[in-house]
Image (cartoon, rainbow, N blue to C red):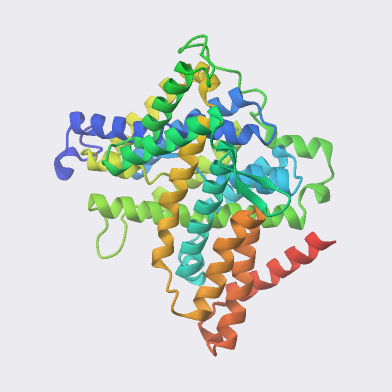
Amino acid sequence: MDRYFRFDELGTNYRREMIGGLTTFLAMAYILFVNPYILSDAGMDEGAVYVATALAAAIGTIIMGVLARYPIALAPGMGLNAFFTYTVVIGMGIPWETALLGVFISGLVFIFITVVGVREIVINAIPAELKYAAGAGIGLFIAFIGLKNAGIVVGSEATLVELGHLGDPATLLAIFGIVVTVIFITLGIKGGIFYGMILTAVVGMIFGTVPLPNQIIGSIPSISPTFGAIFAPFGEMAFGEVFTLQLFIVILTFLFVDFFDTAGTLYAVANQAGFVKDNKLPRAQRALIADSSATSIGALLGTSTTTAYIESSSGIAAGARSGFASVVTGLLFIVALFFSPLLVVVTNSVTAPALIIVGVLMAGALADIDWKKFEIAVPSFFTVLAMPLTYSIATGIALGFIMYPVTMVCKGRAKDVHPIMYGLFVIFILYFIFLGE
């Protein structure tokens, strides 16, 4: 096994890989509780989503470790789960079963464009600034959801939103969670978000704000409420009623965000580990196939898009260098299946700090946008701003993709816009026309 994972070549051993795999798991374990919480707002069974989340993370991470042999973990992505729930299901009124079908198809498309080599064409077609803007906008959107759930930001008839009642016990607990999580991450503690959730839940239980769990370890919840739900729409609606323009936009958005989030994460983490050679990532196709396969498998199980996690960098910092670390992380997600009783302590106050801090980290992409070029600043600004203000990731991406060709043509840079971007311009115009009907 050590020869397959090339321990000698990478200068590693079983101990370092196991520590690295454990570190990565602790850094991203929060998704086990945050993902079911978010998807339950879409009407999905929380226990079933917990199981789907753990299994999708386990299967995807193990495939990454064995096939691509990289110490990179996968799990249902933050931002994509918010898009699934708040934009697609609640905002567009699409049943969650149909939304899962969209996730499943986006994974298959991802596999196809990776295998046939279209990946590079698509990556080069969309300007880097719009990729950064999408990531930052999703971060602001997630943070806004966290602030709302914490009661820090509330609705207002006069000003749309305003500061909430900070004296409310649940809000105070969320503020405590934000502060301790910020402290953990500032101190460089690996798994700071996860530890912040644990400490917040413990304090909440002490003061009676969070309910006490009946047990810590229990039987695995049934996955039947979500498993295979992607096939349900075909038994209830005609083919044309399922595959609408609206669903096409949903699939496109799932594909876009997952595609670039994965590519960015893979290269960032691989570069940290020293895997990138001459600006190229060896076995990149295998890594992308592992990611896209995990997305389709996760949708079949009953969860939103599965993607590579930047938290894998914490495991690499702890010494992980091979795919064996990913196998360890995947096995730990399987063990986590027995800890579902802890879902009862994951309240708004406990999850809100995680959402806000993840939003802070994602907003860092704003620094990579060239704001001095107005033709770039305008579409980037609309992308970032529209997501939290319209409560829709798809709307933000659509506005950015519409404004980009407009500003570039007016600037005399029409030839710098890839034909694919002009095609997307038309598609998103039709998208808004369709919404207005």
Q: Nearer the viewer, residue 142 or 130?
A: 142
Q: Is residue 241 above or below residue 327?
A: below
Which quarter of the image is occupied by the N terminus? top left
Return the x and y of residue 35 as percentages of the image width and height: 54, 34
Q: Quadrant of residue 271?
A: bottom left
**430 displayed left or right of 256:** right
Residue at 40% from the left image edge and 48% from the top image edge:
287
Residue at 56% from the left image edge and 72% from the top image edge:
379
Q: Nearer the viewer, residue 238 or 391?
A: 391
Asked whether residue 37 appears in the rendered view, the answer is yes
Return the x and y of residue 230 as percentages of the image width and height: 68, 37
Q: Quadrant of residue 396?
A: bottom right
Return the x and y of residue 127 as percentages of the image width and height: 49, 71
Q: Nearer the viewer, residue 47 or 333?
A: 47
Q: Nearer the viewer, residue 154 or 234?
A: 154
**403 displayed left or right of 71:** right
- Farthest-out residue, top: 214
Which quarter of the image is occupied by the C terminus? bottom right
Residue at 24% from the left image edge and 30% from the top image edge:
19
Residue at 49% from the left image edge and 41% from the top image edge:
355
Return the x and y of residue 155 as percentages of the image width and height: 67, 46
Q: Is residue 36 above or below residue 73?
A: above
